[in-house]
Image (spheres, grey):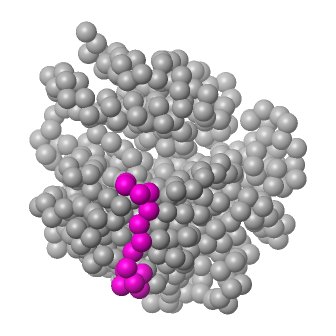
């Protein structure tokens, strides 16, 4: 069965996966969605006997149908190798009656590595398939985490270059250190004198500059985007839902066909949407529990049917979930509207115009698999503290939001279905908040705090943190926040300045 990708905002003809990966966003501003959802063609029992890489192939071959077996297996082999610090890639740990799916064993110790390790390989394969011999240039603005994960993914991948802009005074010291020490001659990191919004506006303006595009074209370059709406990031995320289910099966926790719930700490809605797709592809998923922090726009949406971004933006200890517009929700809206682009577009236009929209009763009925919940800062701390107390297991604040929401759900419903809590970051990535929640002192430098956390959690300091000790700074580029200055930095790096 051939799967093509169509826009959520128009009835333009669907395109093959490789082209959707290269484009990122549809020309009409919509997101690409599969025009049909295939069903797994191996039984869950058969998949339970496979390792992560083979499960990845079995899932991705169904969604990226214009890639050959050889191409996909090469991408998978290059992505999920010893860059991960465990052979299992995504281990499942039991603690206090739930199963924690640890998606933080990659290079930047957070779940974005799951997709950003493979996206560069999918992209260069897609370019080759479409007879593009230009080098792909990735341009990213980051508030900290995504930038580093993208840098690590694209570093030293032949045929690609990556430029990351970050707000010079707007990221944590450890985040900055991780970025400016990035290796790989194809990487470039620039601090701007401005905030994240300035960085993002600059990148957008550079991206759409027609004259620059032509100049790059002549020099053999072309831009592409690695942000979370690219289906090249979404598809690899379906894999670990299938993998988690089949590990529970293999370990005898469930029998084939039994339902499993997933609780997902959510921001942009990409991770949990992959879970929804896994369900439609045949994984017996009971409930998808969408966990938010105090920016509870999704909780309100699931409980009222109204999405309303007109509210105060709150800074929390789970910054990767501090989001008021969850871009990937648009895909779910499109599906629950009956795969109707016109209906979806009308709602998205309302969101742009009024900052809110309300879905119909019919659409709400199709959301019945989802439950929304949220955790306050106090709840989050308590979730870290209590799990450490009961099981000696230390989790990061994002995962703690999910645990807190799941505990609330279990108490309210009495649902005893086996539940996977999707664990999106290593506690070492957010060590200050974690140590505070555990009542520990935090007045030391980052690397000493990592050592302290290591003793308490009885887990070694991950390489991503320990290798920062004494690492050489490789990127010293700084510029002001104007588009012109930022563009100069890009042109200089590509060697195409006038
Ligand atoms: C990005 C991120 C999330 C949110 O994931 P979405 O796919 O945007 O919902 C949660 N936790 C961590 C640690 C993240 O980096």
* Residue 124 spot, x, y in % from top left: 26, 42
> Between residues 147 and 154, which one lies in front from this camera angle?
147
* Residue 475 spot, x, y in % from top left: 51, 21
Q: Name which residue lies at 73% across and 58% down.
A: 377
In the depicted structure, whether residue 405 falls above or below residue 66: below
Q: Name which residue lies at 16% across and 34% down.
A: 133
In this view, which residue lies farthest toward the top?
Answer: 498
* Residue 69 spot, x, y in % from top left: 23, 60
In the depicted structure, whether residue 241 falls above or below residue 267: below
Horizontal arrangement in the rendering, residue 476 relative to residue 205 (left or right)? right
> Which quarter of the figure has residue 186?
top left
> Which quarter of the figure has residue 205?
top left
* Residue 18 spot, x, y in % from top left: 21, 53
> Between residues 487 and 346, which one lies in front from this camera angle?
346
Horizontal arrangement in the rendering, residue 279 relative to residue 142 (left or right)? left
Instruction: Tell me which segment is drawn in magenta.
Output: 352-365
Residue 111 seen from this side = no
């Amino acid at each position: 069965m051939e799967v093509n990708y169509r826009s959520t905002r128009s009835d333009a003809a669907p395109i093959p996966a490789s082209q959707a990966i290269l484009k990122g966003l549809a020309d009409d501003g919509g997101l690409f969605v599969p025009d049909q959802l295939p069903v797994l063609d191996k039984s869950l029992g058969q998949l339970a006997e496979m390792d992560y890489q083979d499960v990845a192939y079995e899932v991705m071959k169904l969604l990226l149908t214009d890639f050959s077996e050889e191409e996909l297996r090469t991408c998978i082999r290059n992505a999920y190798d010893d860059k991960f610090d465990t052979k299992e890639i995504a281990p499942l740990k039991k603690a206090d009656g739930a199963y924690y799916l640890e998606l933080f064993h990659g290079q930047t110790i957070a779940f974005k590595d799951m997709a950003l390790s493979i996206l560069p390989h999918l992209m260069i394969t897609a370019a080759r398939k479409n007879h593009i011999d230009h080098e792909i240039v990735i341009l990213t603005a980051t508030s900290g985490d995504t930038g580093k994960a993208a840098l690590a993914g694209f570093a030293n991948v032949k045929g690609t270059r990556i430029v990351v802009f970050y707000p010079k005074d707007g990221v944590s010291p450890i985040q900055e250190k991780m970025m400016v020490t990035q290796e790989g001659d194809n990487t470039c990191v620039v601090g701007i004198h401005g905030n994240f919004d300035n960085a993002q506006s600059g990148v957008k303006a550079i991206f759409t500059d027609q004259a620059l595009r032509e100049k790059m074209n002549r020099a053999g370059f072309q831009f592409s985007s690695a942000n979370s709406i690219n289906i090249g990031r979404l598809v690899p995320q379906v894999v670990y839902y299938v993998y988690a289910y089949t590990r529970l099966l293999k370990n005898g926790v469930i029998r084939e066909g039994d339902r499993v719930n997933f609780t997902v700490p959510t921001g942009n809605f990409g991770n949990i949407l992959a879970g929804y797709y896994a369900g439609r592809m045949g994984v017996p998923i009971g409930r998808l529990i969408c966990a938010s922090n105090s920016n509870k726009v999704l909780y309100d949406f699931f409980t009222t049917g109204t999405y309303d971004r007109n509210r105060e933006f709150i800074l929390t200890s789970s910054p990767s979930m501090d989001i008021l517009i969850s871009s990937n929700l648009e895909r779910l809206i499109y599906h629950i509207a009956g795969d109707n682009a016109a209906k979806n577009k009308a709602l998205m236009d309302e969101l742009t115009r009024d900052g809110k929209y309300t879905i119909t009763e019919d659409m709400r009925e199709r959301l019945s698999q989802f439950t929304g919940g949220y955790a306050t800062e106090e709840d989050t701390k308590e979730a870290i503290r209590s799990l450490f107390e009961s099981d000696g297991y230390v989790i990061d604040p994002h995962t703690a939001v999910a645990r807190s929401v799941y505990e609330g759900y279990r108490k309210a419903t009495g649902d005893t279905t086996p539940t996977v809590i999707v664990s999106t970051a290593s506690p070492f990535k957010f060590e200050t908040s974690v140590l505070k929640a555990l009542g520990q002192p935090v007045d030391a430098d980052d690397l000493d705090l990592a050592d302290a956390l290591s003793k308490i959690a009885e887990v070694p300091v991950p390489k991503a943190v320990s290798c920062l000790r004494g690492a050489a700074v490789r990127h010293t580029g700084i510029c002001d926040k104007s588009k012109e200055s930022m563009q100069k930095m890009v042109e200089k790096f590509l060697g195409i300045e006038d």
